[in-house]
Image (cartoon, grey):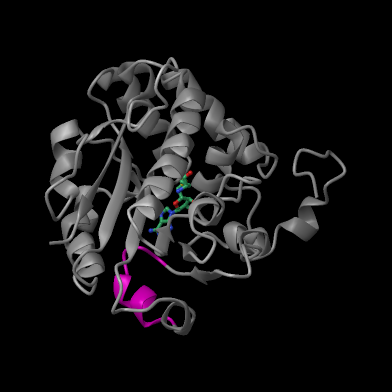
Amino acid sequence: MDARDRSWDDERADTPEINVRVAHSARMYDYYLGGKTNFDADREAAANALRAFPSLFTTARENRGFLLRVVAELARRGVRQFLDIGTGIPVEGRNTHDAAQAVAPESRVVYVDNDPIVLAHARALLTGDPRGATAYIQADLRAPESIWADPALRATVDFTEPIAVLLIAIMHFVPDEQDPHGVLARLTGPLPAGSFLALSHVTHDFDPVGWAKLVSAYQEAGIPAQPRTGGEIEGLFPWPVLAPGVISVAQWNAPVGGSVPGAAEVSCYGGMARKP
Ligand SMILES: C[S@@+](CC[C@H](N)C(=O)[O-])C[C@H]1O[C@@H](n2cnc3c(N)ncnc32)[C@H](O)[C@@H]1O
């Protein structure tokens, strides 16, 4: 169903679980990516955010590109199990299992999001290569124990083999008062040696005033958010970051010879680390 369709029946869509009258970060991000799973409340909040930082479309597009490149790189390094937390609304042909299974069809992916709208679209995520597997869990990053204990995860993931945890454009929704370092310690503690963490995160390094306004726009929509400096983002990794370091997502493993937008325009850093 096309969410932009004016014939869309808000009364039916507006279940206790899925409230179309309140902006959701997943649907605002879908809007930045040019998707159709967004409603008036999401687009109004997104318009306020875009007034504060007009290149958010670029940020979203480049971040999604980073997601696909980092997953492909992890698969080339031999990783066959991925835990993608903060999945977002599926993007046709541009999801974690698409990137992983293009390199290794036997890859297994567990998706996790706490937004019921993502659950409503999860079927599109569960269509991977039959030689691999995909699963979806509705859970909250801030309760990592519930993710590790979930039967769907236990059925999909082998704890004797490395696992890549993906936190792509989600940690900026865990402000300092919600103890991001504690969350990361509890999330990464159970991982076997040789596992990876890939993370991307928006930054106010280049435009502190614009990002302060953007944070206010999200807060007004009921979504707490916190951009961080490059140093703070690097400090979220519990293990040493691998080359090329924590850099603009647009530049990370960018195709040789292509032109990429500048770091300020993107204002989002990414990197990956390996558990010793
Ligand atoms: C900006 S989107 C990123 C989507 C995708 N990872 C990407 O980078 O293309 C952030 C996603 O994180 C989810 N999210 C935010 N806070 C969360 C939490 N505490 N637990 C689980 N998911 C969360 C939102 O619902 C949304 O789908």
Please identify the quarter of the rendering in which residue 33 is found. Answer: top right
Q: Is residue 175 magenta?
A: no
Please identify the quarter of the rendering in which residue 6 is found. Answer: top right
In the depicted view, which residue is nearer to us: 193 or 52? 193
Taking 246 as reference, is 31 left or right?
right
> Residue 12 at x, y = what percent?
79, 60
> Residue 2 at x, y = what percent?
79, 44
Taking 43 as reference, is 169 left or right?
left
Residue at coordinates 82% horizontally, 39% vertically from top-left?
A: 5
**Span highlighted in magenta in the image:** 140-150
Residue at coordinates 22% horizontally, 74% vertically from top-left?
A: 190
In the depicted view, which residue is nearer to us: 149 or 249? 249
Q: Quadrant of the C terminus?
A: bottom left
Determine whether 192 is above or below 85 in the image: below
Residue at coordinates 54% horizontally, 71% vertically from top-left?
A: 135
Q: Is residue 145 magenta?
A: yes
Determine whether 205 is above or below 178 in the image: above
> Residue 249 at x, y = what percent?
35, 32
